[in-house]
Image (spheres, rainbow, N blue to C red):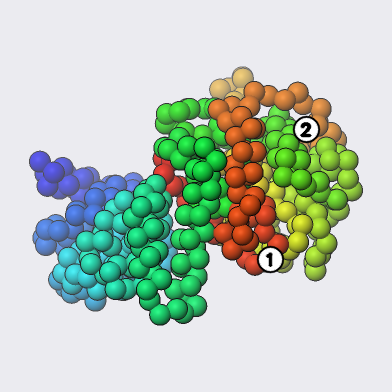
């Protein structure tokens, strides 16, 4: 039955392609190849790879198309499959890359480059259990440090600290190098933070989004969504239209958490974009401190405010904030949980998949006269007026996470040494990597 359904989906994709609906054809292929075993049958693999090559040509990806054609003519050539899978992964086509690399792994099992590339593709898709099982079944984790790390990370992202701890133990047995020490520090840091949170009596279950976010990314999550809670979102947002009340709630929670850990920002510094400017003005008003635009080589204490890191177009700002400095804290209002920014902020208000800002253009509404979806233009009011609107809002309902939980998580992490500390307690070094997904699962588009 499964083979029949796969064949039917391939036929549908071919029909889409022949009728010029290339996006629909590619979407159908992507859905089909979500099953890692979909290319096991030789004849089916040749046909599917041939269609992927034709689609890639149509999208202008001629190099990938050429590699896929080699696979079509030589479907049992592991090197050809590996090359095609890597090329697709470089273009972030992780689902299709994983299916091709899985076939490669079947033909040439337990090859470290293949296993690590395949595991990385699965991780980028947040398919952590599949990644962990794949690496463990290869047997490579027992003697290859990279595979030991990938296995440990994947199990930890599934919430299995026991298996992750065992992989960390194996990593320690390897000769120390810059790479092994980096991987070991990452695992040890996540495990240490998780243990500290649990010792404080805070659950680490499949609803503990705030706690797990702090353990995995070292970032304090100020607010969980009440929409679709607990199922299917469990505290994350899929699509959210940001608003003055939501930003007001975030700033109030930030104030409470900072006060609880004994910090009061001496000033507020805005990231160089309008959304951040508005939010920083409101933050400065709330804390009663000076507002400053960001300038390069600023190493003085302060609260750096960004609405969303992906909206900041200054490479200099993004590079500068990658490094911790004494009493410099980074507050980011909105963080993506499906495609996270490279490093984690010290504090973030919410986790989203898609978000629209209320005043910089793009916020959605329905035209009452026509019923059509509309996208707003940038608000012409002065930024100071919009910041005042944020501060004038009454506090909305807090959602499923009381502020006291965030404070408890922060206090649980405060005593840790800097090597394992959350971002809010670090004074040097690069910010921690921001993880996608985790043991708390949410629906996504």
Quarter of the image with the C terminus in it: top left
Is label 1 in contact with label 2 (beta carbons under 8 Å)? no
**Distance between the Cα atoms at labels 1 and 2?**
33 Å
Q: Residues within 10 Å of mark 1 (few under 14, many from 20)?
A: some
The answer to whether residue 231 is left or right of residue 375 is: left
The spot of residue 348 in percent (x, y) is: 63, 45
Residue 329 to residue 143: above or below = above
* Residue at image mark 1: 428
The quadrant holding residue 64 is bottom left
Residue 181 to residue 191: above or below = below
Circle 1 or circle 2, nearest the eye: 1
The tag on residue 212 is none
- Residue at horizontal 53 percent and vertical 48 percent from the top: 196
- Residue at horizontal 38 percent and vertical 65 percent from the top: 169
The spot of residue 267 in percent (x, y) is: 85, 50
Quarter of the image with the N terminus in it: top left
The quadrant holding residue 317 is bottom right
> Which callout, 1 or 2, points at the residue further toward the start of the chain?
2
Viewer-proximal residue, 195 or 328?
195
- Residue at horizontal 88 percent and vertical 40 percent from the top: 288
Residue 156 to residue 246: above or below = below
* Residue at image mark 2: 390
User: Is there any visible trace of residue 311 in the rendered image?
Assistant: no
The spot of residue 307 in percent (x, y) is: 69, 46
The spot of residue 306 in percent (x, y) is: 71, 50
Residue sitting farthest toward the top: 369
The answer to whether residue 133 is left or right of residue 250 is: left
What secondary structure is found at the residue carrying circle 1?
Answer: loop
What secondary structure is found at the residue carrying circle 2?
Answer: helix
């Amino acid at each position: 039955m499964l083979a029949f359904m796969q064949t039917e989906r391939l036929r549908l994709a071919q029909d889409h392609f022949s009728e010029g609906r290339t996006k629909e054809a590619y979407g159908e292929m992507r859905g089909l190849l979500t099953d890692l075993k979909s290319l096991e049958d030789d004849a089916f693999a040749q046909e599917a790879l041939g269609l992927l090559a034709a689609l890639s040509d149509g999208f202008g990806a001629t190099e990938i198309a050429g590699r896929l054609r080699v696979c079509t003519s030589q479907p049992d050539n592991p090197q050809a499959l590996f090359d095609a899978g890597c090329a697709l992964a470089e273009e972030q086509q992780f689902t299709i890359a994983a299916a091709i690399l899985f076939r490669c792994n079947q033909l040439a099992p337990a090859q470290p480059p293949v296993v690590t590339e395949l595991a990385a593709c699965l991780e980028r898709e947040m398919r952590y259990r599949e990644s962990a099982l794949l690496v463990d079944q290869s047997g490579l984790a027992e003697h290859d440090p990279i595979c030991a790390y990938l296995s440990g990370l994947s199990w930890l992202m599934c919430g299995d600290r026991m298996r992750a701890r065992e992989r960390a133990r194996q990593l320690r047995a390897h000769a120390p190098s810059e790479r092994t020490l980096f991987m070991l520090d990452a695992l040890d840091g996540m495990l240490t933070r998780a243990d500290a949170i649990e010792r404080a009596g805070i659950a680490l279950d499949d609803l503990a989004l705030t706690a797990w976010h702090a353990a995995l990314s070292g970032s304090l999550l100020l607010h969980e969504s009440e929409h679709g809670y607990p199922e299917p979102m469990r505290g994350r947002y899929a699509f959210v239209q940001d608003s003055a009340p939501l930003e007001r709630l975030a700033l109030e929670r930030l104030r409470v958490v900072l006060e609880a850990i004994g910090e009061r920002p001496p000033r507020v510094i805005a990231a160089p974009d309008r959304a951040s400017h508005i939010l920083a003005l409101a933050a400065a008003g709330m804390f009663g401190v000076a507002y400053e635009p960001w300038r390069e080589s600023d190493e003085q204490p302060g609260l750096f405010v960004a609405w969303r890191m992906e909206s900041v177009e200054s490479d200099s700002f993004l590079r500068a904030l990658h490094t911790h400095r004494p009493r410099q804290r980074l507050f980011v209002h909105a963080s993506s949980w499906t495609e996270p920014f490279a490093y984690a902020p010290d504090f973030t208000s919410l986790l989203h998949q898609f978000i629209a800002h209320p005043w910089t253009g793009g916020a959605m509404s329905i035209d009452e006269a026509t019923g059509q979806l509309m996208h707003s233009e940038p608000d012409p009011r002065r930024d100071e007026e919009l910041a005042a609107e944020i501060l004038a809002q009454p506090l909305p309902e807090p959602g499923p996470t009381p502020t006291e939980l965030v404070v408890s998580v922060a206090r649980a992490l405060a005593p840790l040494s800097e090597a394992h500390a959350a971002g809010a307690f670090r004074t040097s070094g690069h910010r921690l990597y921001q993880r996608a997904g985790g043991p708390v699962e949410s629906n996504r588009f």
